[in-house]
Amino acid sequence: MRHGKRVLVVIPARGGSKGIPRKNITLVAGKPLIAYTTELLRELPWIDHSVVSTDSPEIAAAGQAAGTADVVWRPEDLSGDRIGDMPVLAHALEESEKSAAHRFDVVLMLQPTSPLRTAADVEACVDLLLSGSWDSAWTVSETSLSYHPHKQVKISPNGVLEFYFDSESSIVARQELQRSFHRNGVCYAFTSSFVRNSETVFSRGNSTALVTPGVHISIDTPADILAVDRIITNSSAI
C-alpha cells in the first residue's frame, strides 16, 4: 500500500507490434525489454499487485521470468493496434479485483517501452497523484525549444508550407516561448474510479504531471533500441 491506498500495476504488452516485431521481448542489452519493467517491481515493495496484460504466451513467459507479475489475458477485442490504453487498464483492473477479492484504489500503467525508468520516478508519480484530488498523473519531460510546438510547421495537400499554430508568425524571440513538455511514458497513475469510468487517460482540468529528470527514451523504432542499449551498457560498465 502507498499512503493507505491499494496499488495495482498494469504492464500492457500485446504481441502484435508492427513497428518492431516482437518489440516487448526484443533483447536490449542482453535482456528482454519487458524484463526491465517486471524486475523494477522488486524495488517497489508497496505495490499490492502487478499484472502483465497480454495476448501472447511468449510475452507472458518473459514477463513472469522475474517472478513479480501475474498475467491477465486480453480478449481478442482488446488485442488490436487501434485499442486505447483505458479499455486495457479497465479490463486488467476488473480481472485483478476478481482474483484478489478486493478493490484497488490506484492503477499504475508501466509500459515496457520505457526501460530507463527508476523506482524513484514511479514513487514520485504516485505520490503526486495522491497529493491532491487528481484523476491522473503523468510523467513528462521538458521539450527542447528546438522542437517547441510553436516552431512546428505543416505542409498542406497542395504543397503550401504553413505554421502549425497561427500564433507562431508573431513570435520572434525564444524568450517569448512558454515552456512545453511531452509525455515520456515512464509512468501513468490513475485513481481506480477514473479507470472504471473514463474512456481516455486524460482528465481535462483534473490531470497533473511530474517532470522527471534524466534521459527517458520511449522505444518506438530500432534506433531507439540501439540508443537505450548503449545507455544501459555504458552505465553497467561504470
Image (spheres, rainbow, N blue to C red):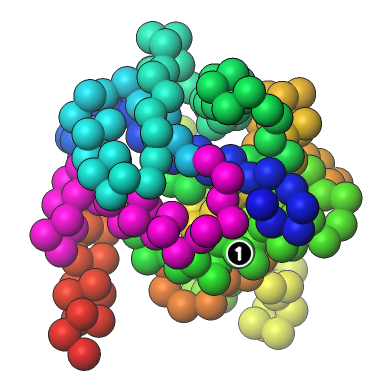
Q: Name the side, left or right, on which 55 lies relative to 148.
A: left
Q: Position of residue 63 (x, y in %)?
A: 29, 41
Q: Position of residue 221 (x, y in %)?
A: 25, 50
Q: Position of residue 44 (x, y in %)?
A: 51, 60
Residue occupying the far front of the picture = 101
Residue occupying the far top of the picture = 76
Element at label 1: helix
In the image, the segment drawn in magenta is 25-49
Residue 136 in the magenta stretch? The answer is no
What residue appears at the point 58 percent right and 45 percent down from the top-left corner?
48
**Is 142 in front, or is 96?**
96
**Is 97 in front, or is 127?**
97
Instruction: Provide the residue designation for mark 1.
Output: 123
- The total number of labels drawn is 1
From what the image shows, is residue 160 above or below residue 114?
above
Res. 170 image quadrant: bottom right
